[in-house]
Image: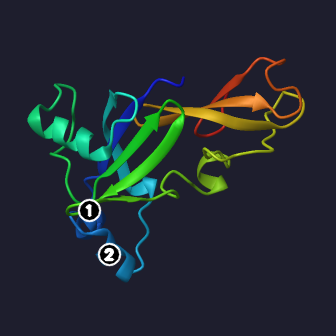
Amino acid sequence: MSRSQFAVYQLKKKPELRNLLFRTYEELAQDQIPVQVANYEQVYLGTMKPGETPEQIKKDLEKKQPHNYKGHAVSTSDVLILNDNGATTTYYVNKDTFIEIPDFMKVTSSESGGLTKDTVGYEIEGKDGTWEVIDYLLVEGKNYFLMEHEQYGKDVAYVVLDQKGNV
């Protein structure tokens, strides 16, 4: 699960989201529009070299777009999520920079059962005690969370939950 990978997210092709396309982070902030995962879809998931930067990933994708890449070239308003051996960082693609947006993957409990990469104290139906997220993986636009028992840790089998909290 700690394999280094990255994902490219682009705005969903919905008429109500057109006004967000290719806007800078500053423009969105000025209009108080949050960058949230609900407006995006994953268009690519790939492996990355440990320590690789968003700039390097963007340049590599510009040179050669993989055959299973489903979007337009990486540009302003896109989001890159890098999972570098378990350390996950999310970036908004701005004109010439990348802006870290730590709240991108956070969703309200009504949307996903409360699971985020920072979840602790989670109760899993049919399992005793409370659990915490220790890693997560993006697969075809869906999040899967590796849960560890808070009291017994590695002495108990891990549990994998989807983004809705289902085992």
Mark 1 or mark 2, earlier in chain: 2
| Three-letter residue code for mark 1 | Asn
Is mark 1 in CB contact (under 8 Å) with mark 2?
Answer: yes
CA gap, disc 1 and disc 2: 9 Å
Residue 114 in picture, x, y percent from top left: 67, 49
Residue placed under numbered mark 1 in the picture: 94
At 16% from the left and 45% from the top, the residue drawn is 72
Residue 140 visible in the current orientation:
no
Q: Residues within 10 Å of mark 2 (few under 14, many from 20)?
A: few
- The answer to which image quadrant residue 4 occupies is top left
Q: Secondary structure at mark 2?
A: helix
Vertical order, 117 against 145 (above or below)? below
**Which residue is found at the position 68% from the left and 37% from the top?**
133
Residue 26: which disc? Answer: 2
Q: Quadrant of residue 146?
A: top right
The residue lying at 43 percent from left, 50 percent from top is 90
* Apparent side of residue 22 relative to residue 120 in the rendered image (left or right): left
Residue nearest the viewer, comparing 154 with 129: 154
Residue 157 drawn at (x, y percent): 77, 17
User: Image check: 2 left or right of 10?
Assistant: right
154, 127: nearer the viewer: 154
Residue 134 placement (x, y as % from top left): 66, 34
Q: Which mark is residue 141?
A: none
Q: Residues within 10 Å of mark 1 (few under 14, many from 20)?
A: some
Look at the image and tell me whether residue 77 can be seen.
Answer: yes
Q: Amino acid at mark 2?
A: Glu
Q: Quadrant of residue 5?
A: top left
Please identify the quadrant where the C terminus is shown: top right
